[in-house]
Image (cartoon, helix red, strand yellow):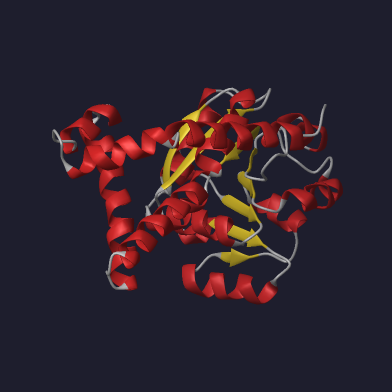
Amino acid sequence: MAAGKKSFGFIGAGAMGSALMRGIIQGGLVTPDRVFASDPDTERLQQLAAELDITPVKDNVELLDKADVVVLAVKPQVVKEVLEPLKGKWSPKQVVISIAAGVTLWELENYIQGTPVIRVMPNTPCLVRAGAAGIALGSQAGAEEGKLAQELFGAVGEAFLLPEELLDAVTGLSGSGPAYCYLFIEALADAGVQEGLPRPVAQRLAALTLLGAARMVLETKKHPGELKDMVTSPAGTTIAAVSLLENRAFRGTVIEAVRAATRRSREMAPKG
């Protein structure tokens, strides 16, 4: 089920939907003539069509007629409104990939019957092709469909196949995680400004520091603790700062923040 042989239809051409379109086209997974999109904002849709050379369609029924893979890229609160008119119009040969946060596979399969359904929890760095996503397969989706979803989200980052019950943890960690990182960047930059650095320099130093540290973890494959020890010389500046962070329960607070977001994600999910 190679992506290049499929046609893709995007219901929703907002930030995440358009990021995925750019990713699969610029990454060479599919040619623009095999990408179709619908969106209530016709002006935005036309702008995207002009930029990427994709084909806009007049409605979602037409999109279903043209697409082998349908990406549901709408807000969770409008999923019912979007899917209700499409009941009974799906083909068993299609694949549906939903990125609507919190909408369960059970809910999706209630509307999309007889067609493989996949649920994905991406994050906003997909917009710069540095995303992290969790993928859960529906009852009729198998290894081929999972490979297709990984290929699609691999065009805008990295994706992991997981049981659906772990997507709440993905939400708490990587889905909400960019916000924690932005807070940390902002705090680092504020501290730099307090110590006399110009704001633009402090902010860039802070962002580059997080970027570099993340690349060190990913590229060296060393444990973060080992990398921390490489920076922490005896009686030096870093150990003084690390000691203060430990005394203020920095790691414990981050862990509880991720767990709080995970719990909230579970609470928000409708019970099937």
Image coords of residue 197 (percent x, y): 27, 69
Position of 138 relative to 33 (above/below): above
Position of 112 relative to 10 (above/below): above
Q: Quadrant of residue 112?
A: top right
Q: Nearer the viewer, residue 264 or 84?
A: 264
Residue 179 appears in view:
yes
Q: Residue at x 37, y 39 (%)?
A: 245
Image coords of residue 212 (percent x, y): 25, 48
Q: Nearer the viewer, residue 89 or 82?
A: 82
Q: Nearer the viewer, residue 98 or 128?
A: 128
Q: Quadrant of residue 116?
A: top right
Q: Residue at x 29, y 64 (%)?
A: 195
Image coords of residue 129 (percent x, y): 40, 52
In this rendering, would 99 be left or right of 60? left
Image coords of residue 87 (percent x, y): 84, 42
Q: Residue at x 51, y 61 (%)?
A: 33
